[in-house]
Image (spheres, helix red, strand yellow):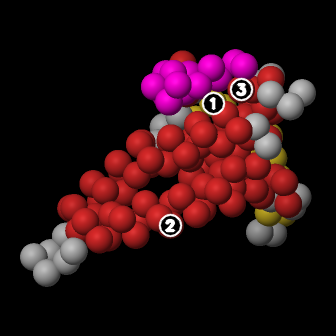
Amino acid sequence: MADNLKKLLLYIVQHPVLQNERREAELDATAVQDVAGEVRAIAHDQQEDANQRAPYFAKGLKLAAVGPVVVDDTDPDGIGIADAFARYLVAPDLATSQGEHLSEGHFRYTFEVNWPKLKDIAQRAGIDLDAALKEGQ
């Protein structure tokens, strides 16, 4: 898997995604909660999840470089890409998604990456996104 795309994913987790989680924890806080401890636990869980989904994130981004990514949840790669994109691109508003019902309990998802926003995040992370997308080809 492309190291720079994994680095980008971890940057997204540490910044846009984690910032959203931190805000939610602070809003939900009560006087007896350990907000800092909760934020550390959330950060650890997010890092673990990102490491597991990194290959799908990279594969999906490489597909997205040539147009919208269309995946089905009937395929293991499709499930992985859809999950990674939903968590790390759609949630922080770095991509959009649409779902289409296929059959009982199954869907097809179309993702469109917001390249200007993602390139801005990549630049802040010190990553040349265009070069990273070509790694391993």
The residues bearing labels 1 and 3 have C-alpha atoms spaced at a distance of 15 Å
Residue 53 is a magenta residue: no
What residue do we see at 54% from left, 58% from top? Answer: 47
Residue 133 percent location from the top left of the image: 75, 26
**3 or 2: tag closer to the N-terminus:** 2
Q: Residues within 10 Å of mark 1 (few under 14, many from 20)?
A: many
Which image quarter is the C terminus in? Answer: top right
Residue 123 is a magenta residue: yes
- For discs 1 and 3, the disc positioned in front in the rendered view: 3
> Please, what is the three-letter code of the amino acid marked with disc 2?
Asp
Q: Which residues are magenta?
A: 119-131
Residue 97 to residue 118: above or below:
below
> Please, what is the three-letter code of the amino acid marked with disc 1?
Val
Res. 102 visible in picture = no
Instruction: Determine the residue located farthest toward the left in the rendered image.
Output: 31
Is residue 23 shown left or right of residue 12?
left
Q: Which element type, helix, strand or loop, lies under badge 3?
A: helix
Q: Which element type, helix, strand or loop, lies under badge 2?
A: helix
Main SS of the magenta segment?
Answer: helix
> Please, what is the three-letter code of the amino acid marked with disc 3?
Ala
Residue bearing mark 2: 45
Res. 36 visible in picture = yes
Q: Kindly identify which numbered label has been placed on residue 132.
A: 3
What residue do we see at 86% from left, 31% from top? Answer: 136
Residue 125 percent location from the top left of the image: 50, 30
What residue do we see at 27% from left, 54% from top? Answer: 23
Is residue 91 shown left or right of residue 98?
left
Residue 30 percent location from the top left of the image: 14, 75
Residue bearing mark 1: 113
**1 or 3: tag closer to the N-terminus:** 1
What residue do we see at 70% from left, 18% from top? Answer: 130
Q: Which element type, helix, strand or loop, lies under badge 1?
A: strand
